[in-house]
Amino acid sequence: MQQDTEFESDGRAIRCTEVFYWLKTPDLSLSAVLPSCSVFHREMAVASCSALTPHLSVLSASGINSLALRVSTHTDLVEYQAGSGGRLLPQRYMNELDSALIPVIHGGSARVPQTAMDMEFIFYITHTV
């Protein structure tokens, strides 16, 4: 995923590198849905990076160097979970994500996809040079 903004703090950077899609409606094709999702997934990735940037040193020190955010959209509901290594992120980081992601979901410049699907965002924390 092309990310225009760099998110760095204390010698570390976070970047969303991939987004995976799982459609929950078998009669739709991914190619028909993707154009309507591109702005939404970009805003979600940027908001996530922005929320987690102040915590990169602590996350990295606790062994979290990669993490995933799964966003599930339904007709009238959007929910998400974030974790690493098969475990949910600690609540303090989820609170930061809530503060960043809820405005995107409820009032961002992109509409939430109306197609029932899961989107999984993969993030990596790296050392900056």
Image: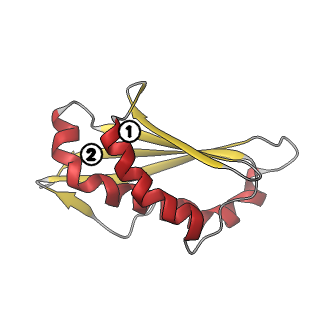
Which residue does the image show at 48% across and 48% down from the upper left? Answer: 18
The total number of labels drawn is: 2
Which circle marks residue 42 in the picture? none
Find out whether the residues at labels 2 and 1 contact each other: C-beta distance under 8 Å. yes
* Residue assigned mark 1: 67
Indicate the position of residue 67 as horizontal and vertical percent values: 38, 38
Foreground residue, 99 or 109?
99
Residue at 57% in and 70% down: 107
The vertical placement of 106 against 87, above or below, is: below
Tag 2 residue = 125
Residue lying furthest bottom: 109
| Residue 105: percent from left, percent from top | 57, 61
The C terminus appears in which quarter of the rendering? bottom left
The residue under the point 33% across, 34% down is 90
Question: Rounded to the nearest whole Å, what is the CA distance between mark 2 and mark 1?
Answer: 8 Å
Q: Compare residues 97 and 29 and report the one nearer the observer.
A: 97
The local crowd at label 1, few if under 14, some if 14 to 19, many if 20 or more residues have their Cα within 10 Å, is many
Instruction: Return the disc, 2 or 1, that comes first in the chain's sequence.
Output: 1
Q: Is residue 9 left or right of residue 18?
A: left
Q: Callout 1: helix, strand or loop?
A: strand
Q: Residue at x 37, y 48 (%)?
A: 95
| Amino acid found under the numbered disc labelled 2 | Ile
From the viewer's perspective, is 117 left or right of 56? right
The correct choice, above or below, for 37 with respect to 66 in the image is: below
Residue type at tag 1: Leu
Label 2 secondary element: strand
In this rendering, the answer to whether 109 lies above or below 116 is: below
